[in-house]
Amino acid sequence: MASPAAASSVLLLLLAAFTAGAGAATFTIKNNCGYTVWPAATPVGGGRQLNPGQTWTLEVPAGTQSGRIWGRTGCSFNGAGRGRCATGDCGGALSCTLSGQPPLTLAEFTIGGGGANDYYDISVIDGYNLPMDFSCSNGKNLHCGTPRCPDAYLYPSDNSKNHGCRGNSNYKVTFCP
């Protein structure tokens, strides 16, 4: 029979594991374009190739600050994950650790950064390269189909474009909705 101290330790470990995953958010990224898109995500996720119709799922931990997801186009990479993209390039890497170079349509988010709320928006401040929808499972669907889309930040002080939703939400980013 386990000692009370050992049983308490196991219980604390299980509780810590459960609590750590409770604030994470799932991001489902889908390519509805008729061509390949290479989505990128920072600070978690990196990047990968998505052929038409494919999806990519990311788990983003609570407290993630200044997260971004964007689509890159016209990319060519070698077997070592080095190459170049015509739009949204991040230093020639397949798996991004840096933000992409303009032009790029950005899905921006903060998970668990404001108490019980998460925050998300679309930005075209750095230019526009792909149509995008970005939605929270319990919030507004944001749509950006043109460079001057009304749901997106168009300039830095355009603070009316940030949207909140309850924490522990899931998100969907769709290219060419």
Image: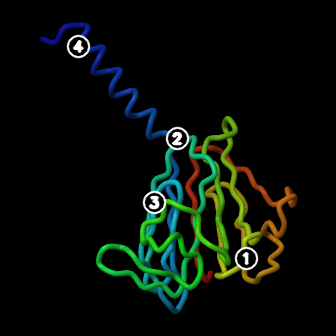
User: Mark 4 highlights which residue?
Assistant: 6
Kindly identify the residue that appears in the image at 45 percent across and 53 percent down: 59
| In the image, residue 40 above or below residue 115 | below
Point out the image quarter for the C terminus: bottom right
* Coordinates of residue 37 in the picture (x, y in percent): 50, 82
Inspect the image, locate mark 3, and give the three-letter code of the amino acid beneath it.
Gly
Q: How far is disc 4 from disc 2 in space, using C-alphas? A: 27 Å
**In the picture, residue 162 is in which quadrant?**
bottom right
User: Mark 2 highlights which residue?
Assistant: 23
Which comes before the other along the chain, label 4 or label 3?
Answer: 4
User: Mark 3 highlights which residue?
Assistant: 45
For label 2, the SS is loop
Which comes before the other along the chain, label 4 or label 1?
Answer: 4
Kindly identify the residue that appears in the image at 75 percent across and 55 percent down: 163
Point out the image quarter for the N terminus: top left
Could you classify mark 2 by the number of other residues whose Cα lies within 10 Å: few (under 14), some (14-19), or many (20 or more)? some
Q: How far is disc 1 from disc 3 in space, using C-alphas? A: 22 Å
Q: Is residue 167 left or right of residue 19?
A: right
User: Mark 1 highlights which residue?
Assistant: 127
Kindly identify the residue that appears in the image at 79 percent across and 69 percent down: 151
- Which residue is nearer to you in this view: 1 or 125? 125
**Of tags 2 and 3, which is closer to the observer?**
3
Which comes before the other along the chain, label 4 or label 2?
Answer: 4
For label 1, the SS is loop
For label 4, the SS is helix
| In the image, residue 86 above or below residue 12 | below
- Which residue is nearer to you in this view: 58 or 158? 158
Which comes before the other along the chain, label 1 or label 3?
Answer: 3
- Which residue is nearer to you in this view: 160 or 169? 160
**Of tags 1 and 3, which is closer to the observer?**
1
